[in-house]
């Protein structure tokens, strides 16, 4: 009986390990290419990290650097040259500006609204809530074209505003917070009112602290979605490199298969991808919670 | 409950934004789809249903519908089943489940655009490790396994693997070949999506009470399969419904991998809806036809969600 159990267990591990290896292939490829020299990449040799021989890089000297500057180990060169070629910090900064602004505005709009929907009685409340439910059906990407037409007419293409405006209203956020506030006892709010607090202070001083767990989950969901979003920035940012978000930056590095050097290109892609992956591995539980909460009612 | 005027200031900003950002654009797309309007033109004419007629008669758009449907019909069932299988396996492990969970969830988190480029190199006919792995395996165990030589009806001379080995390592070109491109894109779609479904199923599994399994055993459901049929699957009904809906909506919106890897080609075999909207309306500035595609797209999604809600109300309650 016990032996059978172990056989069953190792059989499962076998399958799962194969699955895990397949899932990891592109990550392996990405990291490996960012570390190796061009010759090793083209001849598919050197395993994960390559031989790391000190060498002089011709593309680098072509860019006008001295031979001395251009002589180093491949991994160092790839990352160094990636930062020389493109304003990577700027892209990361833009990603941060856009995702944080989106999240803050979403909360600013959604929190009071969901409080009102959950705890205040007013005419038309049911109507507003059914409007929220209807809007939950509309994926913003699906209506990207008319939104783009509106923003173009308003002269906002190629601005931070264009990156942020379509995401300022998160009906999902309103819905999530409303469900959460429904579980908060009325006595808490009544007590606050007895203490002479106005509705505004109740929202920001009583409800906000109570909602922290839900907000955290929502923050992760929102930040991950918008940090990784490529479609929308691709549409509204047409040429201004100063406004590139990380995915647009990645897209620019990619001269693709025709580009002269793959190492620095992959190094820039690794640099841009890594912040979120590290954050994920550090706070895994919260991430999984935050992202799966999207549908858990 | 309390009466004050505060709700006006609490609710109106959200209402205005919902109308302007989410509802108005639908009507705008509807309006534009009946005109010949192009962004930048100052005037336009009403053309009736011309754009829709084009959409359902021209070859390009027929191909668009076929490739979108193929993608959705492959990615949704495969990633849902894989997610379920992975969740059940992880749930029954004694150790190591967390590591697998992290790994399977990585593609959900990682920037898809970056991963698309990583896949481009992985699958590249000469630079990629997939084809070099296959080429190095000619005549060996890899050929035996992946060439399906272990199946009695596959002869070891004319399996796809042996033929490729014999023809100077003529392995598939994956994204460059119109016979394989859409399947490769689907594979990447599954790769990206199944971890998300797995996590939702894991959450669903933990909420099934243990007693139900004991009860099922009492009733004679001894084998794992019978218990799955009797307890696990029905109890996961609501999760499945949600997982299927969200994966479908996301699959309809596939864009990043297409733009980076195939640009809708070869021969429009991967010309999905979002890419069509992007190419026609944004790159070629034919706003009106883009609007028509948008309208069809929104109708699809809304119908789908209504269907889901209908099923939830009618069928899924235990």
Image (cartoon, coloured by chain):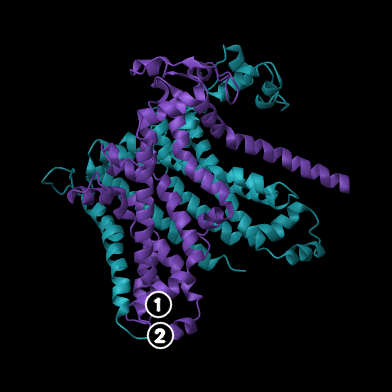
Chain colours: A purple, B cyan
In the rendered image, residue B142, in percent from the top left (x then y), is placed at: 68, 23
Residue, disc 2: A193
Which residue is at a point 39% across and 68% down the rendered structure image? A111
The residue at which mark 1 appears reads as A202
Residue at the bottom extreme, as displayed:
A194
In front of the other: B290 or A208: A208
Question: Which quarter of the picture shows residue B213?
Answer: bottom right
Element under label 1? helix
What is the spatial separation of the Cα atoms under label 2 and label 1, in whole angstroms? 8 Å
Residue neighbourhood size for the residue with mark 2, other residues' Cα within 10 Å, grouped as few (<14), some (14–19), many (≥20): some
Residue that sits furthest to the front in the current view: A68
Dot 1, how many residues are within 10 Å of its Cα: few (below 14), some (14-19), or many (20+)?
some
Q: Position of residue A71 (x, y in %)?
A: 46, 17
Q: Is residue B173 visible?
A: no
Q: Residue at x 37, y 34 (%)?
A: A251
Q: Is residue B164 left or right of residue A86?
A: right
* Residue under the point 36% across and 28% down: A85
- Horizontally, residue B185 falls left or right of residue A199, namely right
Write down the chain letter for disc 2: A
Q: Is residue B184 above or below residue B216?
A: above
Q: Is residue B67 above or below residue A208?
A: above
Let me know if residue A85 appears in the view. Answer: yes
Q: In the image, is residue B173 above or below residue A105?
A: above
Labels 2 & 1 near each other (Cβ < 8 A): yes
Q: Secondary structure at mark 2?
A: helix
């Amino acid at each position: 009986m016990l032996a059978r159990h172990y056989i069953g267990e190792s059989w499962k591990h076998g399958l799962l390990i194969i699955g895990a290896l397949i899932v990891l292939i592109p990550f392996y490829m990405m990291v490996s290419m960012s570390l190796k020299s061009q010759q090793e990449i083209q001849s598919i040799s050197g395993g994960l990290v390559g031989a790391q021989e000190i060498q002089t890089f011709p593309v680098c000297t072509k860019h006008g650097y001295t031979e001395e500057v251009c002589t180093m180990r491949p991994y160092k060169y790839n990352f160094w040259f990636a930062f020389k070629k493109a304003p990577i910090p700027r892209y990361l900064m833009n990603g941060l500006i856009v995702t944080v602004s989106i999240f803050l505005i979403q909360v600013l709009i959604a929190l009071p609204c969901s409080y009102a929907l959950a705890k205040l009685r007013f005419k038309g409340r049911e109507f507003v809530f059914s409007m929220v439910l209807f809007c939950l059906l509309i994926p913003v990407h699906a209506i990207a074209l008319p939104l783009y037409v509106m923003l173009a007419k308003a002269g906002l293409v190629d601005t931070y505003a264009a990156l942020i405006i379509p995401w300022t209203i998160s009906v999902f956020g309103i819905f999530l917070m409303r469900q959460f506030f429904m579980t908060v006892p009325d006595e808490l709010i009544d007590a606050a009112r007895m203490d002479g607090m106005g509705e505004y202070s109740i929202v920001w001083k009583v409800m906000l602290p109570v909602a922290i767990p839900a907000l955290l989950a929502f923050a992760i969901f929102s930040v991950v979605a918008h940090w990784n979003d490529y479609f929308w920035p691709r549409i509204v940012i047409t040429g201004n490199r100063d406004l590139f978000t990380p995915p647009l930056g990645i897209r620019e590095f990619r001269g693709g298969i025709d580009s002269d050097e793959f190492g620095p290109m992959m190094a820039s892609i690794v640099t841009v991808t890594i912040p979120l992956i590290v954050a994920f591995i550090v706070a895994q539980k919260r991430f999984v919670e935050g992202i799966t909460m999207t549908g858990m009612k | 409950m309390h009466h004050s005027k505060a709700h006006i200031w609490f609710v109106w900003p959200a209402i205005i934004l919902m109308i302007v950002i989410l509802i108005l654009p639908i009507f705008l797309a509807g309006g534009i789809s009946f005109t010949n309007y192009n962004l930048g033109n100052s005037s336009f004419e009403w053309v009736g249903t011309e754009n829709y007629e084009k959409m359902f008669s021209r070859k390009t758009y027929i191909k668009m519908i076929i490739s979108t449907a193929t993608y959705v019909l492959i990615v949704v069932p495969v990633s849902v089943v894989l997610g379920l299988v992975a969740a059940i396996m992880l749930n029954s492990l004694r150790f190591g489940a967390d590591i697998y969970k992290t790994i399977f969830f990585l593609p959900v988190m990682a920037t898809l655009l970056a991963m698309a480029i990583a896949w481009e190199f992985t699958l590249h006919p000469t630079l990629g490790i997939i084809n070099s792995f296959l080429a190095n395996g000619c005549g060996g165990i890899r050929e035996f396994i992946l060439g399906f030589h272990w199946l009695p009806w596959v002869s070891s001379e004319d399996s796809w693997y042996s033929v490729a080995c014999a023809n100077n390592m003529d392995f598939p070109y994956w994204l460059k070949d119109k016979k394989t491109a859409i399947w490769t894109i689907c594979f990447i779609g599954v790769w990206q999506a199944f971890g998300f479904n797995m996590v939702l199923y894991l959450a669903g599994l933990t909420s099934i009470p243990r007693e139900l399994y004991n009860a099922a055993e009492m009733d004679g459901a001894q084998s794992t399969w019978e218990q799955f049929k009797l307890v696990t699957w029905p109890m996961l009904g609501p999760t499945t419904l949600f997982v299927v809906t969200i994966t479908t909506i996301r699959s309809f919106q596939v864009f990043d991998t297409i733009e980076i890897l195939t640009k809708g080609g070869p021969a429009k075999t991967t010309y999905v809806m979002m890419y069509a909207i992007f190419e026609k309306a944004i790159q070629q500035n034919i706003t009106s036809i883009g609007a028509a595609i948008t309208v069809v797209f929104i109708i699809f999604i809304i119908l789908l969600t209504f269907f889901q809600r209908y099923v939830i109300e009618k069928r899924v309650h235990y």
